[in-house]
Image: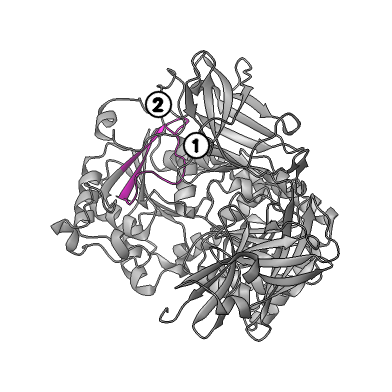
């Protein structure tokens, strides 16, 4: 059977895209599956797509490339299909060019089933589709999420299809009530497919609450932040991490800063894969006003996290059993204060009861199996068979479509077959072991017989500093393994790229990161060796490769807390822990102007009990033409050499842009602490006159 999914944009990481990729992968076990992306905004998808699933874009929207079709005359004319405000905006808004490409594709395809995943795409399928194939629509939001004007044109299109699938039974009921009784389409619910993670589940020992999703109003991260603020004093060891991107980010950051919780709540940005981040948590949080399904709920359950979710329409109450595998928090339609209080009460209860977290987390992990992609794929196959008996026979591979749909993406997961070429980048995983050692696993099918070692090569020394450990292979195993033992190696500070190396000629191929598990770092503290503090943090580079960030400092001053005072308070208060040196009488904080006059012009403050109050006034007055950078140090005792102040503990290879602080503004000058690319703490003082 040949199955196609029609997506607006398959190159992002949103819930619709993730659920489609998951289902397509499961169906590819038994069928020929293709994803048709109406738009192609970038070269490669953010999600890894199984090589058996062919990805075909219809309109090239890659800005700045030779293929960019945004300026094409036909793309300047409006679409004739009804408007879907959620996607009909920006560069990828539907146009006459979109209409033409989709219509041509739907006329030519030899698929047995075509599944449209957005209202606009349902409109295309109803108008341009053919009875040669089954035509299905999906609702990844809810009936209430669409304005009446959209329903007026979308609902007749839905009624003309063979079937329409929502992700909750409650929402299916709404559509059955809204659509005409004589409709052709069968309306039913099938939940989203959510695969079990490849990463190890949470061990439940962290003090981290994790939340993830689009940073938009309906997700109500403001409610979650308000609820966390209510328990912050009673749970001083707990932190909240929020993953995602979206239009509410700046507003949420202001809220966090105004509450003074910037050292407790972190906006982490988007992460893919997200499974390793769920594994770092002990509690998952969903505080939405509405959830059509709740993929993040199931993802967290797979990781063994108990989930606290608002009992909002529609998904959470169909996924969670309150008190058994999670907690449902009632929403008060009359009082947002009551809703926040109820959520805070649930947070307080679960963060304070280790046994309850363990029990709910274990039950959640077991319950999540019912959403695994193969189970969901079987439900779709059953639907296909019910509508058109005999339609689910396995498709023959090859033929016309191999040529017609041959474009697609560069695949990241190599199928079984010949060894890769010399320029290929084998896939690799890295996990931090309990003692801080690094366990690398390289996909065996992508290694040649001569690939004998894992090589770590120091980027700054151009290979003069390197570590080699044997790649050990087990017959029949999918992965070859190499372990870099902490006790056996002292790694100079810097960034280390990873390679598969051939022993005979020392040729090497850089490793692509597919999974980086840092969970163990949360319980290790600041690791040290004979030469001083020596954290090792594996991470994925911005271009997708596997690397390791290391520090090696005989003496180090770790900043454990940063308090940015108001203009009236006139100081930033820093709390410090010393490593490799003892804080004694005369210990002080030092702010040194980069490129300035040295110690004579330093700004100083005494350290008492590890805490110092560094005044703003001298830094406000002294800066460069537009900006001054004040690097921060600790002098551990009178007459001692200063030690750079930074934050090396934890699982952040790069804190810049993630650990952020509010600013103190006065008379057109802004003072703000920030972490540098080496995770050291610096204060920026810059002119902002004229800035918005």
Q: Is residue 304 magenta?
A: no
x and y percentages locating residue 224 in the rendered image? 65, 69
Q: Is residue 609 left or right of residue 46?
A: right
Q: Return the residue nearer the eye: 372 or 382.
A: 372
x and y percentages locating residue 595 in the rendered image? 53, 63
Q: Return the residue nearer the eye: 211 or 65.
A: 65
Q: Return the residue nearer the eye: 181 or 242.
A: 242
Rendered view: 584 above or below 571: above
Q: Which residues are magenta?
A: 28-56
x and y percentages locating residue 237 in the rendered image? 78, 62
Q: Which residue is mark 1?
A: 26
Residue 321 in view here:
no
Q: Which residue is mark 2?
A: 423
Q: Are marks 2 and 1 in contact (CB under 8 Å)?
A: no
**Under tag 2, what secondary structure?**
loop
Q: Is residue 379 left or right of residue 84?
A: right
């Amino acid at each position: 059977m040949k199955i196609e999914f029609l997506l607006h944009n398959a190159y992002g990481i949103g819930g619709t895209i993730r659920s489609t990729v998951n289902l397509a992968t499961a169906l590819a076990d038994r069928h020929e599956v293709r994803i048709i992306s109406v738009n192609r905004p970038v070269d490669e998808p953010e999600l890894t797509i199984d090589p058996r699933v062919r990805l075909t874009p219809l309109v090239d929207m890659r800005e700045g490339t030779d293929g960019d079709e945004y300026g094409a005359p036909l793309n300047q004319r409006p679409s004739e299909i009804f408007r879907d405000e959620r996607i009909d905006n920006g560069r990828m808004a539907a146009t006459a060019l979109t209409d033409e490409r989709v219509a041509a594709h739907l006329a030519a395809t030899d698929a047995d089933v075509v599944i449209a995943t957005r209202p606009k795409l349902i409109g295309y399928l109803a108008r341009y589709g053919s009875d040669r194939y089954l035509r299905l629509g999906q609702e990844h939001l809810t009936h209430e999420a669409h304005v009446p004007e959209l329903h007026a044109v979308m609902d007749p299109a839905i009624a003309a299809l063979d079937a329409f699938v929502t992700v909750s039974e409650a929402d299916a009921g709404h559509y059955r009530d809204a659509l005409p009784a004589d409709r052709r389409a069968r309306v039913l619910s099938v939940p989203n497919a959510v695969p079990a993670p490849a990463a190890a589940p949470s061990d439940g020992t962290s003090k981290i609450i994790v939340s993830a999703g689009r940073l938009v109003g309906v997700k109500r991260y403001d409610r979650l932040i308000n609820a966390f603020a209510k328990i912050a004093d009673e749970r001083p060891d707990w932190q909240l991490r929020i993953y995602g991107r979206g239009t509410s980010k700046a507003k949420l950051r202001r809220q966090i800063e105004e509450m003074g919780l910037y050292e407790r709540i972190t906006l982490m940005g988007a992460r893919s894969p997200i499974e390793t981040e769920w594994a770092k948590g002990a509690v998952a949080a969903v505080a939405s006003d509405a959830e059509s399904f709740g993929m993040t709920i199931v993802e967290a359950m797979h990781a063994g996290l108990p989930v606290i979710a608002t009992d909002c329409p529609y998904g959470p109450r169909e996924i969670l059993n309150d008190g058994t595998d999670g907690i449902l928090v009632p929403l008060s339609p009359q009082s947002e204060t009551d809703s926040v209080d109820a959520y805070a009460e649930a947070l307080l209860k679960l963060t304070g009861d280790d046994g309850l977290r363990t029990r709910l987390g274990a039950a959640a992990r077991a319950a999540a199996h019912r959403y695994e992609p193969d189970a969901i794929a079987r439900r779709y196959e059953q639907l296909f068979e019910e509508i058109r008996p005999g339609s689910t026979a396995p498709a023959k591979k090859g033929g016309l479509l191999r040529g017609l749909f041959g474009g697609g993406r560069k695949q990241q997961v190599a199928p079984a077959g010949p060894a890769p070429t010399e320029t290929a980048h084998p896939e690799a995983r890295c996990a931090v072991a309990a003692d801080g050692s690094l366990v690398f696993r390289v996909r065996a099918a992508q290694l040649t017989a001569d690939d004998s070692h894992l090589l770590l090569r120091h980027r700054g020394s151009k290979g003069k500093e390197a570590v080699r450990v044997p790649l050990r292979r087990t017959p029949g195993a999918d992965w070859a393994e190499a372990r870099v033992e902490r006790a056996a190696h002292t790694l100079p500070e810097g960034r280390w790229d990873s390679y598969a190396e051939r022993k005979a000629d020392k040729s090497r191929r850089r490793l692509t990161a597919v999974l980086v598990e840092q969970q163990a770092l949360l319980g290790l503290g600041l690791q040290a060796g004979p030469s001083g503090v020596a954290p090792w943090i594996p991470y994925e580079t911005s271009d997708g490769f596997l690397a390791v960030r290391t520090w090696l400092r005989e003496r180090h001053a770790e900043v454990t807390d940063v308090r940015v005072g108001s203009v009236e308070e006139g100081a930033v208060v820093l709390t410090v822990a010393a490593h490799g040196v003892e804080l004694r009488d005369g210990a002080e904080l030092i702010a040194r102007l980069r490129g300035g006059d040295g110690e004579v012009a330093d700004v100083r403050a005494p350290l008492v009990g590890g805490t110092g109050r560094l005044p703003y006034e001298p830094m406000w007055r002294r800066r460069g033409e537009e900006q001054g950078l004040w690097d921060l140090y600790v002098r551990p005792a009178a007459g001692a050499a200063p030690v750079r102040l930074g934050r090396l503990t934890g699982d952040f290879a790069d804190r810049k842009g993630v650990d952020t602080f509010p600013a103190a503004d006065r008379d057109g000058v802004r003072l703000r602490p920030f972490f540098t690319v080496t995770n050291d703490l610096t204060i920026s003082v810059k002119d902002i006159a004229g800035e918005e």
